[in-house]
Structures are given as structure tokens and as C-alpha cells.
Amino acid sequence: MTAFTHFDAAGRAAMVDVSDKNATVRIAIARGRIVMAPETLARIVEGQVGKGDVLGVARLAGIMAAKRTADLIPLCHPLMLSKVSVELTPTAPNAIEIEAMVKLTGQTGVEMEALTAVTIAALTVYDMCKAADRGMRIEAVRLVHKSGGMSGEFHAE
């Protein structure tokens, strides 16, 4: 097993020094889902949620979250992202599948940004629909692909 990188010699939390790493194209894809009552999904798809376009707002929230990941997770590097996409796909009878892809050319990866985008998109769906369905569940948020950097490719599925 590879050693943890976010600790110094004394075991204290530390930001990783990436200044000696080569800049490479780095891509990460994360996925997750939010499960809800079938009636809630139908209202989302039909545009019958009083707060507005749930999928559009959640897509924007995910993109914004990817750009702000370093503000949320203490040891993440602030990054100049070159691409963020978030797709929300209603899946009958009762879920919305969420996928985020994040890309940059840089010295550190974008896995946390992709995971944050999926999570915040799901939380936004929850926020916009909670008045009708407090039993929604956010599930299976995970990294499914990573490329670039010294550790190379990763594929989960």
C-alpha cells in the first residue's frame, strides 16, 4: 500500500509540495446518484418543482463547487481548471445519476474536484426537493476514472 502523502515527518497534516512535478493533462471522472420517491423524480422531469429547474441549478452548483474545492477541503491545492462538466440523468423509476468530469493541465490531480462536483450537485437536488421528499438518499459517490500524472490511469468500473 502506498504511503499517505498529506502528513509531514512528525505526522502532522501538511499540504503536498507539487512544485517539482511536471505539468501534465489530468482528468478525473466521478459518479454518484440521488435516490428519491418516484413522484419526486416525475415532478423534477416535468418541471413541477416550485423552486425552478432542478437539473439546471444542480449542474451549475456542481460546476461552481469544483472550482471552489480548495475552499472546502483544507489540503487541496487551488487549481486553474480548464474544463468542468456535470451531467444529471433522470433514471426511472426513482433516481438521478450524476457524472462530473474535471480537466486541467497542471502539477496535481483533479479527483477531489470531480468528487466535490458530484456531491454538491446531489445536495442541490436534495435542497430544491426536500419539502416534498425528505427521504432522498445520496449514494455511491466515487471516482471512476483518473488519468495524468506519475500514478497514471485508474479505472474503477
Image (cartoon, rainbow, N blue to C red):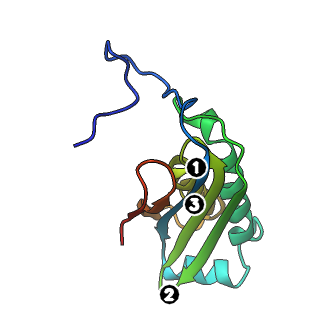
Mark-to-mark CA distance, 1 and 2: 28 Å
SS class, disc 2? loop
Mark-to-mark CA distance, 1 and 3: 20 Å
Residue at 73 percent of width and 63 percent of height: 57
Q: Are marks 1 and 2 in contact (CB under 8 Å)?
A: no
User: Mark 3 belongs to which amino acid?
Assistant: Tyr
Is 26 situated left or right of 33 in this image?
Answer: right
Please state, as top left, top right, bottom left or bottom right, where the C terminus lies in the image.
bottom left
Q: Which mark is residue 42?
A: none
Q: Which mark is residue 92?
A: 2
Whole-percent x and y of residue 59? 69, 64
Decide if residue 131 is in sight here. Answer: no
Going from the N terminus, do you reach mark 1 or mark 2 first?
2
Q: Are marks 3 and 2 in contact (CB under 8 Å)?
A: no
Provide the residue designation for mark 1.
Answer: 113
Whole-percent x and y of residue 78? 65, 35
Q: Nearer the viewer, mark 1 or mark 3?
A: 1
Determine the residue located farthest toward the left in the rendered image.
1
Residue at 60 percent of width and 63 percent of height: 101
User: Mark 2 belongs to which amino acid?
Assistant: Ala
Mark-to-mark CA distance, 3 and 2: 17 Å
Q: Residues within 10 Å of mark 1 (few under 14, many from 20)?
A: many
SS class, disc 3? helix
Please state, as top left, top right, bottom left or bottom right, where the N terminus lies in the image.
top left
Relative to 48, is 138 above or below? above
Q: Residues within 10 Å of mark 3 (few under 14, many from 20)?
A: many
Relative to 18, is 116 above or below? below
User: Mark 1 belongs to which amino acid?
Assistant: Glu
